[in-house]
Image: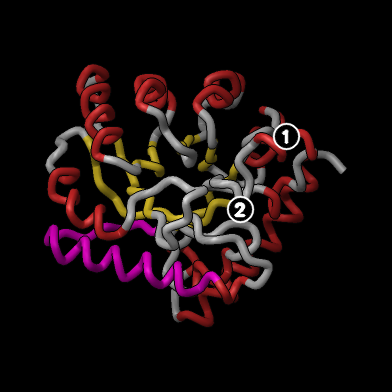
């Protein structure tokens, strides 16, 4: 089976599962954007996914994106979903339409500086470590609320919502409280700022239906669309349970 056949069949099943989750939650499936996570997958997979109707792609590492994006069709839209170091911000601002993993005021301030130099505004999501796991990046909820006004004051950042990676569990129901907590935190942020934050990026291949039921507007899906990665890549690639932000 080639990339187009594999992705087409998998996407149809994913879309059906999203529709059913939306029905259970009384939501419109059009509210849920699939971010296709392409880390370790070749440009051919991106091209095939575009042909199947996917438009937004997520990469975890600036280094991999730097090599891959120029080889992909120009119609692909790219989100950074992995941890961003300050020394990679300049490249990230040039490569990505959105940065989903802003996890400190230091990183946000550097994005502001580099976006100013590039003459653009950068849509961002704030990554929250809702479970307080030491193995994962992200704001503690309390710290996020403390720094929210300073973050919102950075003129080159378009603050569009929150993102999280919950603790891994084979039972999706066990992660529902973390998705619910992120939704509640977004509501608290909206109340403090007096503006709407449109996006909640939460849910991966093993738990995206529960995330949709709890209000996800973006789900970050890799394995369920493209199939499994090689063991060698998984060992060093920041997978679920090891601090990754997309599967």
Main secondary-structure element of the magenta-colored stretch: helix
Which of 21 and 64 lies nearest the eye of the viewer? 64
x and y percent of residue 178 in the render?
Answer: 45, 68
Q: Quadrant of residue 167?
A: bottom right
Nearest-to-viewer mark from 1 and 2: 2
Residue 93 in view of the camera: no
The image shows residue 95 at horizontal and vertical percentages of: 43, 25
Horizontal side, residue 86 vs residue 40: left or right:
left
Is 82 located above or below residue 147 in the figure? above
Q: Which residue is mark 1?
A: 233
Residue situated in front as seen by the camera: 55 or 131: 131
Mark 1 to mark 2: distance in Å? 15 Å
Q: Residue at x 29, y 50 (%)?
A: 160
Q: Is residue 77 left or right of residue 114?
A: right
Q: Give how far across and how far down residue 10 sits, in percent.
A: 73, 55
Res. 67 in view: yes
- Residue 155 image-quadrant placement: top left
- Residue 195, magenta (yes or no): yes
Please report whichever mark, 1 or 2, sits nearer to the chain's N-terminal start.
1
Query: Which residue is found at the position 26% from the left and 35% from the top?
Result: 108
Q: Which mark is residue 241?
A: 2
Specify the segment rendered in magenta. 175-200
Residue displayed at 68% across by 67% down: 170
Say which quadrant the N terminus sits in. top right
């Amino acid at each position: 089976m080639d990339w187009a056949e594999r992705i087409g069949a998998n996407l149809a099943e994913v879309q059906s599962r999203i529709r059913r989750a939306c029905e259970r939650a009384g939501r419109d499936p059009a509210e849920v954007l699939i971010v296709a996570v392409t880390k370790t997958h070749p440009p051919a997979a991106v091209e095939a996914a575009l042909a199947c109707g996917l438009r937004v792609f997520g990469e975890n590492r600036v280094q991999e994106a730097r090599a891959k994006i120029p080889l992909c069709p120009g119609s692909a839209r790219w989100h950074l979903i992995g941890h961003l170091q300050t020394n990679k911000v300049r490249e990230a601002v040039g490569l990505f339409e959105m940065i989903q993993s802003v996890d400190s005021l230091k990183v946000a301030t550097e994005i502001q500086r580099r976006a100013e130099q590039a003459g653009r505004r950068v849509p961002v999501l704030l990554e929250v470590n809702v479970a307080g796991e030491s193995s994962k990046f992200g704001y503690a909820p309390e710290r996020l609320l403390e720094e929210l006004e300073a973050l919102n004051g950075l003129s080159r950042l378009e603050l569009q919502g929150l993102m999280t990676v919950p603790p891994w569990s084979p039972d999706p129901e066990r992660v529902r409280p973390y998705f619910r907590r992120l939704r509640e935190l977004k509501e608290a942020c909206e109340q403090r700022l007096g503006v709407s934050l449109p996006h909640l990026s939460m849910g991966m291949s093993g738990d995206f239906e529960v995330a949709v039921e709890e209000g996800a507007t973006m789900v970050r899906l890799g394995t369920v669309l493209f199939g499994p990665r090689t063991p060698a890549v998984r060992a060093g690639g920041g997978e679920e349970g090891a601090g990754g932000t997309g599967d």
